[in-house]
Each structure stands twice: as structure tokens, then as C-alpha cells.
Image: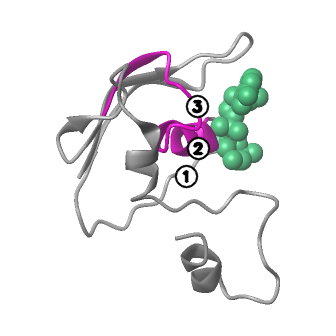
Amino acid sequence: MIELIHLEKKYDLAAPLKDVNTVISRGDIISVIGPSGTGKSTLLRCINLLEKPTGGQILLDGEEITAPKYNPTKARSRMGMVFQSFNLFNHLTVIENLIIPS
Ligand SMILES: Nc1ncnc2c1ncn2[C@@H]1O[C@H](COP(=O)(O)OP(=O)(O)OP(=O)(O)O)[C@@H](O)[C@H]1O
Ligand SMILES: [Mg+2]
């Protein structure tokens, strides 16, 4: 289960995540939709700790992965991410692209 609690991410010129709250349970299949530049990729990068949120908390099965001493590798070992515009293998299917990094 992933819980987002008052999640916030601000850059110098943009604040794409403002008080994001949600619970994603095991087995859920969800889509994050919205116009370009509204923070979809930022949200995913925060969840796998490629970006450090500027506020709020992220819990993975009840453990706060945004805690200062948390080891990001632990959370990332349970997450896969296909980047938006590069690093995809043309000769593989979508599911094969998802599986190969794990
Ligand atoms: N590393 C960064 N430094 C500064 N600003 C950033 C950074 N990454 C994203 N932003 C800004 O944050 C906002 C959200 O960007 P993000 O890439 O998350 O949007 P998106 O919803 O994924 O858009 P798209 O549909 O085009 O993929 C934009 O205004 C973007 O310019
Ligand atoms: Mg994006």
C-alpha cells in the first residue's frame, strides 16, 4: 500500500504538487491523468524518491520512505518505472520493458 499524505513538491518556478493525498492499495491499477506540466511525472519521481518532496509524507506499507534516514534503495527495489521519452527498448513489448529492469 502506498499512502501520500499532504505531498508537496515545489521548484523555483513551479509548484506541481500541492497537498496531494491518496491511498493506493495492493492490486489497484490506477491512472494519473492531466494536462502537460501538471505534475504527473513529478509525482512518480517523488514516489520512487528520484525527487525529494518539499513537504508531506509517503508511506510504503506503513513505513515512511520520506523519513530523513530512509534508504531509497529499499523502496526502489519494489518499484519499476519506465521513463517518459527515452530508455525504452524498441524490440521489446511494454510488459518486457517493465520487467527487464527488475
Ligand atoms: N527538475 C525540474 N526542475 C524545475 N522544474 C521542473 C522540474 N521537473 C519538472 N518541473 C516543472 O514542474 C511542472 C510539472 O512537470 P511534470 O514533468 O511533472 O509534468 P507532467 O504532468 O509529467 O507533464 P507531461 O504530460 O508533459 O509529461 C512543470 O511546470 C515543469 O516545468
Ligand atoms: Mg510527464
Where is residue 97, by image quadrant? bottom right
Which one is earlier in the sequence, the residue at label 1 or at label 3?
Answer: 1
Residue 6 x, y percent position in the rendering = 33, 22
Give the amino acid type for the residue marked by disc 3 in the picture: Glu
At x 26%, y 70%, the residue is 27
Mark 3 sits near ligand 1, with its Cβ under 8 Å away:
yes
Q: Is residue 62 left or right of residue 86?
A: left
Tag shown at residue 93: none
Q: Report the span colored magenta.
A: 39-58
Q: Is residue 53 magenta?
A: yes
Most distant residue in the left direction: 62
Instruction: Say which of marks 2 and 3 sits in front.
Output: 3
Tag shown at residue 40: 2
Residue 102 x, y percent position in the rendering = 52, 71
- Assign a secondary structure to mark 2: helix
At x 53%, y 45%, the residue is 44
Give the amino acid type for the residue marked by disc 1 in the picture: Ile
Q: Residues within 10 Å of mark 3 (few under 14, many from 20)?
A: few
The residue that mark 3 highlights is 51
Residue 40 x, y percent position in the rendering = 58, 43
- Tell me the CA gap for discs 1 and 3: 20 Å
